[in-house]
Image (cartoon, helix red, strand yellow):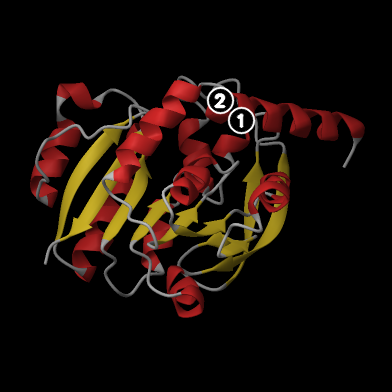
Amino acid sequence: MTFPARLATRFGLARSLAIYYGQPWRRLSLRRFYRSLIAPGDLVFDIGAHVGSRAKTFLSLGAEVVAIEPQPVCADLLERHFSQRFTGLERVAVGATMGEVTLRISSRHPTVSSISSDFIETVSHAQGFRSVTWDREILVPMTTLDALIDRYGKPAFCKIDVEGAESQVLAGLSQPLPLIAFETIPAMRSDTQAALARLMTLGDYRFNKVVGERHRFVWSDWKSVDALMEGLDAPSAGEGSGDIYARLVG
């Protein structure tokens, strides 16, 4: 890696650390939110662990955490600071099949690095992404959710944040999980629809959503998939990215 590339990578990592650890009140809010969803001893998969913000919260609640992160600079950080506390750390992407995949990295904005070329093509011209460049490509191993379950067991909760490849991750799952959260991006509506369709083939789910980093559910009750889609279409849905939570019924 050239010196300018190393400098950009260090800047990007510092930026992510400032975003996710620089506001302690947000970390307290995150812990309060997950306290009602995660119990001590629960197995949790953090797919797209990045710099470990969510994983650290899960650990603080007594969960057994498997962190999955393909970006070398982020995986290195996770290994230095959390490896002794993790149940597992996997330096891989997660998708529909086993193999290898190209990871396109934004050195200065590592939160939007992705294996999805559709995501990069779609958002590169969108507001909020115009200053982002994906300046590096690396080949990384790819596993599936089924393979992770075979290795570690069935998680009580699986968080997926992989920048437009959420439906690809769920395509590699063949059994229902009790609770799943995946990122939804307005510009990637087709990926959200594909992810929801996949979940509904696996089990009877009800849904809720969180907007941005607000760490609270939008609705007091959990919705059917049709009601969720109506909510995503509502005028208030133009609030940017967020997370959809899917809870298995019964």
Residue drawn at (50%, 26%) of the image: 125
Q: Label 1 near label 2: C-beta < 8 Å?
A: yes
Residue for badge 2: 19
- Which of the 4 quarters of the picture holds residue 106? top right
**Vertical placement of residue 161 versus 199, above or below:** above
**Vertical placement of residue 88 versus 243, above or below:** below
Count of numbered circles on the image: 2
Give how far across and how far down residue 215 sits, in percent. Answer: 32, 32
Residue drawn at (56%, 57%) of the image: 68
Residue extending farthest to the right is 3
Residue for badge 1: 16
- Which of the 4 quarters of the picture holds residue 209? top left
Q: Nearer the viewer, residue 163 or 57?
A: 57
Inspect the image, locate mark 2, and give the three-letter code of the amino acid beneath it: Ile
Position of 172 with respect to 4 (left or right) is left
- Using the numbered discs, state the Cα–Cα distance from disc 2 to disc 1 in whole angstroms: 5 Å
Inspect the image, locate mark 1, and give the three-letter code of the amino acid beneath it: Ser
Q: Nearer the viewer, residue 14 or 229?
A: 14
Q: Nearer the viewer, residue 31 or 210?
A: 31
Residue drawn at (49%, 54%) of the image: 47
Give the secondary structure at mark 2.
helix
Q: For mark 2, does the 10 Å Cα neighbourhood hold few (<14), some (14 to 19), or many (20 or more) residues?
A: few
**Vertical placement of residue 209 versus 100, above or below:** above
Residue extending farthest to the bottom is 150
**Vertical placement of residue 46 versus 54, above or below:** below
Give how far across and how far down residue 135 sits, in percent. Answer: 72, 36
